[in-house]
Image (spheres, helix red, strand yellow):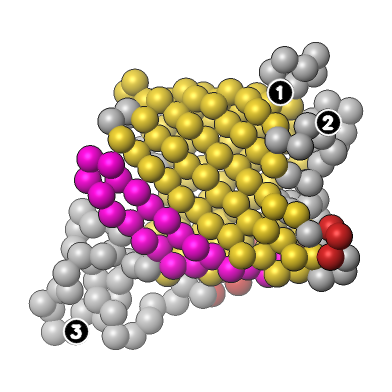
Amino acid sequence: MRLAWILAIVLSCAAPVAGQVTAPAGDPTGKAAPSTTDDATAVEWSFSAAVYTYLLPGESNYAQPTVSADRSWLHLEARYNYEEVDAGSLWAGYNFEGGDTLAWELTPMVGGVFGATSGVAPGYKGALSWWKLGFSSEGEYVFDARDSAESFFYNWSELTLSPHEWWRVGLVTQRTRAYAADREIQRGLLAGVSVRSVDAAVYVFNPDDSKPIVVLAVTVGF
């Protein structure tokens, strides 16, 4: 029920805004030059929905869903079970991108966290790509409104090699308080495949442990 409520808020923010123009076909970012049509009043939205399922040894498994919407520079996002199980967060950010041989993206954001954890969080999402290599990272610092000693920096980062466009392998790190872990920074391996607008990946954290943590992820763009 909570997830449906969060999704409804994000999608309600995705209503067309008057005074902006439609991006030509083939430009999913919506950052192309304005259309010459007299009554063009909308820039295309792009959406994505992701679910990361955590398989935890000795603890209850849980799913971490995220939905996002982008329109030109605007980024909106909703997360659940990210900062803590039974906590949600809503985000707004500004998209920057550039580069050709070395392409980059950066989205500084600010969010509000509520539920099991409550507070305000500045954050970011960013990515670099060159040749067949890619690096992506997202992070946030939650200023806990109930107990300042519980304020915490969350991070998820990936370094990947894509021998072909449709599959990749690489390394992943994570820093989280969503579940109990022996290591402050968890390290692992990843493998993923992409087919059209669907991406699937498996992450194995702390593979040298007798019972590593496994995360299964599916992301759909539309």
Tag count in the figure? 3
Magenta-drawn segment: 93-115
The residue at 87%/33% (across/down) is 59
Residue 173 percent across, percent down from the top left: 62, 34
Amino acid marked by disc 3: Asp
Disc 2 marks a residue whose amino acid type is Asp
Q: State the residue at coordinates (89%, 28%).
A: 58
Residue type beneath disc 1: Asn
Q: Secondary structure at mark 1?
A: loop
- Label drawn at residue 39: 3
Q: Is residue 95 magenta?
A: yes
For the residues labelled 3 and 2, the Cα–Cα distance comes to 58 Å
In the image, residue 203 above or below residue 21? above
The residue indicated by pointer 2 is 182
In what quadrant of the picture does the N terminus appear? bottom right
| Percent coordinates x, y for residue 36 in the rendering | 10, 77
Q: Is residue 141 left or right of residue 86?
A: left
What crowding class fits label 3: few (fewer than 14 Cα within 10 Å), some (14-19), or many (20 or more)?
Answer: few
Between the C-alphas of marks 1 and 3, the distance is 55 Å
Residue 141 in view: yes
